[in-house]
Amino acid sequence: MDMNWISIGDISEIPLRGARCVKTPQGKIAVFRTAENEVFAIEDHCPHKGGPLSQGIVHAKAVTCPLHNWVISLETGKALGADQGEVRTIPVRNENGALFIALESLLMAAE
């Protein structure tokens, strides 16, 4: 199945070790940029109490939720350590700095 890639701006709009939010019909997506310039997209709510992951601290390929310090893998969306739970990950493409997310993955997961 072909993905429907949606442009979400340029990598330069996301600070290193930071994030920005993208609103979609399926909810808010947090798009993260690591110190190594890797880009990941996950749902913007912690599986614990719904904290805004986009406001968390990015370290390596994970983000720490600002509410209760849960650590979420940006690669898998799973809580790390002793915590249980996960958020959906969204495919991201980086084409020379231009970023795109695949919204189909959200629609398929929602069905």
Image (tube, rainbow, N blue to C red):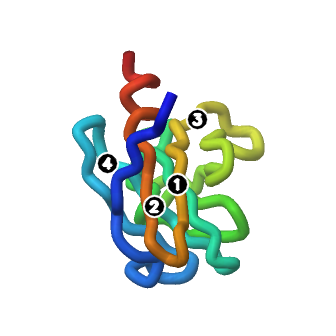
**Which residue position holds label 3?**
86
Compared with 33, 4 (above or below) is above
Horizontal and vertical percent position of residue 2: 48, 34
Question: Which numbered marker is on residue 31?
Answer: 2
Q: Residue furthest front?
A: 2
Name the secondary structure under disc 4: strand
Local crowd size for mark 1, using a 10 Å CA cut-off: few (<14), some (14–19), many (≥20) = many
| Circles 1 and 2 in contact, beta carbons < 8 Å | yes
Position of 110 with respect to 16 (left or right) is: left
Task: Compare marks 3 and 1 and give the one earlier in the sequence.
Answer: 3
| Circles 2 and 4 in contact, beta carbons < 8 Å | no
Mark 1 vs mark 4, foreground winner is: 1
Horizontal and vertical percent position of residue 67: 45, 55
Name the secondary structure under disc 3: loop
Residue drawn at x 62%, y 53% as measured from the top left: 74
Horizontal and vertical percent position of residue 103: 38, 40
**Which residue position holds label 4?**
28
Local crowd size for mark 2, using a 10 Å CA cut-off: few (<14), some (14–19), many (≥20) = many
Q: CA distance from mark 4 to mark 3?
A: 15 Å
Q: CA distance from mark 3 to mark 2?
A: 16 Å
Displayed quadrant of residue 83:
top right
Q: CA distance from mark 3 to mark 1?
A: 18 Å
Mark 1 vs mark 2, foreground winner is: 1
Residue drawn at x 35%, y 52% as measured from the top left: 6
Horizontal and vertical percent position of residue 37: 63, 77
Q: Does the image show residue 45?
A: no
Q: CA distance from mark 1 to mark 2?
A: 9 Å
Mark 4 vs mark 3, foreground winner is: 4
**Which residue position holds label 1?**
92
Looking at the rendered structure, the kind of residue marked 3 is: Glu
Mark 3 vs mark 1, foreground winner is: 1
